[in-house]
Image: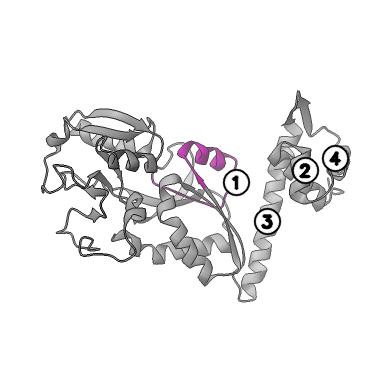
């Protein structure tokens, strides 16, 4: 393997990523025969086939899987070296690979915008995915950092909470309960609810709260995205429980007197003419946002920089 070139390894890893010689050639901006030639030379060097084709689908062999895992380590170490050299020169530059769950899309782009303005030499590859996809990416060690609210039990992670993620009851602004205060949880028993799909972290937190308080709720509709749920609430289909951060897109640029950051005495925030947060007993359900990485992973200078930035700057979003 000492005879293999970095170029050959890059070509091989790109083919493995796409499962296609043609797509790899397009990404690398070289010809398909050149891609095939590089993979063939690498195969000859290793002495074992790296791919097998079944029908039209390309699959990695066992040797290919092992080589791909090694390639990821090599490329990560080279990236880290490049970042360290830049850091020694007083610069922060390199690439941050960040994966976040879908609800985090309501605040992470704002944080990233400010972060990239402060560190213009850092490029960010952002993946916005559901919990299932995040698990797959964790298992494949594809990212530097992960941002999520529900931590997996069976993946060894180093985590740190950086911001609250309170779950609140959302209704249409003209709902009969919108003007009431300190609403008993039992009052929600006859209300139709719109919830996320089974298995979502939000739904599990809701289930635990209502079960603990012996309250049965009527699930009228299940939807797979927060945006769809908000539209359904606006359409008068029922109530829901969502992260307060999902309402960021509903908050006007200029904060009105209806929204007072940090004022614990104000329980109901009017969000334009569409949605409102109900003042219900036992709410908000207090949860946290976590930043995480795989245990044993050596974080790059760039990843450490973003981690520190989160801890320092996220509090402004905690008060909305």
Nearer-the-camera pick, 34 or 201: 34
In the drawing, does residue 320 fall left or right of residue 308? left
Residue underneath mark 1: 142
The C terminus, quarter of image: bottom left
The local secondary structure at tag 1 comes to: loop
Residue underneath mark 2: 12
Residue 141 counted in the magenta span: yes
Q: Please report whichever mark, 2 or 3, sits nearer to the chain's N-terminal start.
A: 2
Q: Please report whichever mark, 1 or 2, sits nearer to the chain's N-terminal start.
A: 2
Closer to us: mark 2 or mark 4? 4
The local secondary structure at tag 4 comes to: helix
Residue underneath mark 3: 77
Which residue is drawn at the image coordinates 83% and 33% (left, top)? 48
Q: Position of residue 7 (x, y in %)?
A: 81, 51
The local secondary structure at tag 2 comes to: helix
Q: Please report whichever mark, 1 or 3, sits nearer to the chain's N-terminal start.
A: 3
Which residue is drawn at the image coordinates 40% and 66% (left, top)? 313
Asked where in the image residue 213 lies, by quadrant, the reply is top left
Residue 168 image label: none
Residue 226 counted in the magenta span: no
Q: Position of residue 249 (x, y in %)?
A: 37, 54
Using the numbered discs, state the Cα–Cα distance from disc 2 to disc 4 in whole angstroms. 9 Å
Which residue is drawn at the image coordinates 51% and 71% (left, top)? 118
Q: Position of residue 187 (x, y in %)?
A: 12, 36
Residue 36 image label: 4
Is disc 4 surrounded by few (<14), some (14 to 19) or many (20+) residues within 10 Å? some
Asked where in the image residue 315 lies, by quadrant, the reply is bottom left
Is disc 1 surrounded by few (<14), some (14 to 19) or many (20+) residues within 10 Å? some
Closer to us: mark 4 or mark 1? 4
């Amino acid at each position: 393997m000492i005879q293999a070139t970095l170029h050959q390894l890059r070509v091989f890893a790109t083919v493995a990523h796409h499962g296609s010689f043609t797509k790899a050639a397009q990404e690398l901006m070289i010809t398909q025969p050149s891609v095939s030639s590089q993979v063939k030379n690498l195969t000859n060097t290793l002495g074992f086939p790296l791919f097998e084709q079944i029908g039209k689908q390309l699959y990695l062999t066992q040797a290919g899987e092992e080589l791909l895992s090694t390639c990821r380590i090599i490329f990560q170490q080279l990236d880290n070296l490049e970042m360290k050299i830049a850091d020694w020169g007083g610069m922060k530059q390199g690439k941050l690979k960040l994966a976040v769950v879908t609800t985090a899309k309501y605040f992470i782009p704002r944080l990233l915008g400010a972060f990239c303005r402060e560190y213009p030499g850092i490029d960010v590859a952002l993946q916005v995915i559901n919990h299932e996809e995040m698990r797959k990416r964790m298992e494949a060690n594809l990212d530097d950092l992960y941002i999520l609210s529900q931590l997996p039990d069976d993946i060894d992670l180093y985590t740190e909470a950086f911001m609250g993620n309170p779950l609140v009851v959302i209704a249409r602004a003209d709902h009969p309960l919108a003007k009431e205060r300190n609403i008993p949880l039992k009052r929600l028993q006859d209300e139709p609810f719109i919830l996320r799909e089974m298995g979502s972290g939000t739904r599990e937190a809701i289930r635990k709260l209502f079960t603990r308080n012996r309250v049965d709720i009527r699930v009228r509709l299940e939807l797979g995205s927060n945006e769809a749920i908000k539209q359904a609430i606006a359409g008068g289909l029922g109530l829901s429980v969502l992260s307060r951060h999902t309402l960021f897109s509903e908050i006007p640029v200029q904060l009105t007197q209806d929204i007072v950051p940090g004022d614990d005495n104000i329980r109901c925030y009017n969000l334009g003419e569409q949605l409102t947060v109900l003042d219900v007993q036992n709410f908000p359900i207090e949860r946290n946002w976590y930043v995480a990485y795989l245990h044993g992973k050596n974080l790059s200078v760039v990843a450490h920089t973003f981690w520190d930035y989160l801890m320092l700057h996220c509090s402004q979003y905690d008060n909305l």
